[in-house]
Amino acid sequence: MAWVESASPSFRARHESTHADEVDRVLHSLERTREYLAQNFPLTVDGMSVVFHSGFASLSMACPMVPLTWIAADPAARRYVAGWSGRHELHIVRPDVLEGRGSAVPGSREMLAATASTLYARRVIIENNPDVPVRMTPRRVRAELRWAWLIEGAARWFGGQTAHARPAIARRLREGRRPAFPPGPRDAPLLGGTVIALLVHERDERAAARLACHLHPQGRRAALRHAFGNRSAAQIEEAWRAHLARMAAAA
C-alpha cells in the first residue's frame, strides 16, 4: 500500500494513503494541543513528523523501546502504551487500530484517542526541562526512571488522558499493591497524571507546568513540597491517596 505525506501548519505526517481523513483529524487535534500547551509552557515544538504504523508489530520494529515500556508498565496501564516520542518524530499506530485496542470500559477509547497529543506533550515537556537531556543518553535514562511520575504524568495530564483514566485507575487499585508516593516507574503511565491533577486542583495549570519544567536538586519530595506551597510530603501524600480513592469510587 502506498505511503503518502500530509501536513498541518506545525506537523507533518507519514501514513498509508487510505487513511488520510483519520490522519487529518489527528493533526488537527495536535494543533489544538500545541496551542493549549503554548498557554502554559515557554516553548512548543514545531516541524515534528508523525509516523502512523499499521499495527504494534510495525511500531515495535521502528521503536524497540515500546515493547520494553509495555512490559515495565503495570497491567492496568499497558493498553495505553501505544506510541513513542522521539526528538523529531512521534510514532503511533493508526487511529482505527487504536480504537480497536480500546475496551468497553468508559474512557478507554478516549484515552487511546489522546495518544498523539500525550506523546507531543511529552516532547514539549522535555524541551522545556533543561534538567532532562533531549538526546537519549544515560543521564536521560536515569532522569526518566527517577522522575517518571512527573515526566510521564505531566504528559498524560496535559495530553488529555488522565481525565478519562478513572476506570483504569480503579482496576489498578483493586488488582495491585498499594502504590508508592510519588508513583514508581511501573505506575507512572497511569498514576503519575493523578499527582498533576491534584496539583492543578489545589493550585492551577501554571503550577503544574512549572513543576514539569524542573527537576528539583533535592529530589522528588522536595519538588512536591515546593509545588504544593511548602506543605509537608506526608500531607501531600494523604491528599493524593484521598484523591485516588475518590477517582476509583467514581469509576
Image: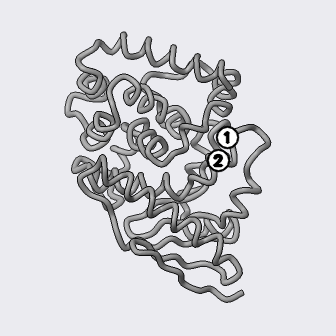
- What is the CA distance from the residue labelled 1 to the residue labelled 2? 5 Å
- For image coordinates 31% across by 50% down, the residue present is 39
Q: Does residue 199 appear left or right of residue 163 in this picture?
A: left
Residue on which disc 2 sits: 110
Q: Amino acid at mark 2?
A: Glu
- For image coordinates 36% across by 11% down, the residue present is 234
**Percent position of residue 153, x then y:** 45, 39
Badges 1 and 2: C-beta atoms under 8 Å apart? yes
Total numbered labels: 2
Most foreground residue, 151 or 108: 108
User: Which quadrant holds the C terminus?
Assistant: top right
Q: Amino acid at mark 1?
A: Gly
Q: Does residue 240 appear left or right of residue 103 in this picture?
A: left
Count residues near mark 1 (Cα–Cα under 10 Å), then give few for <14, some for 14-19, many for 20+: many
**Percent position of residue 151, x then y:** 39, 43
**Percent position of residue 30, x then y:** 48, 62
Q: Does residue 49 appear left or right of residue 214 in this picture?
A: right
**Percent position of residue 225, x then y:** 27, 21
Residue on which disc 1 sits: 107
Q: Is residue 105 above or below residue 5?
A: above
Q: Residue furthest bottom?
A: 2
Residue 19: image quadrant is: bottom right
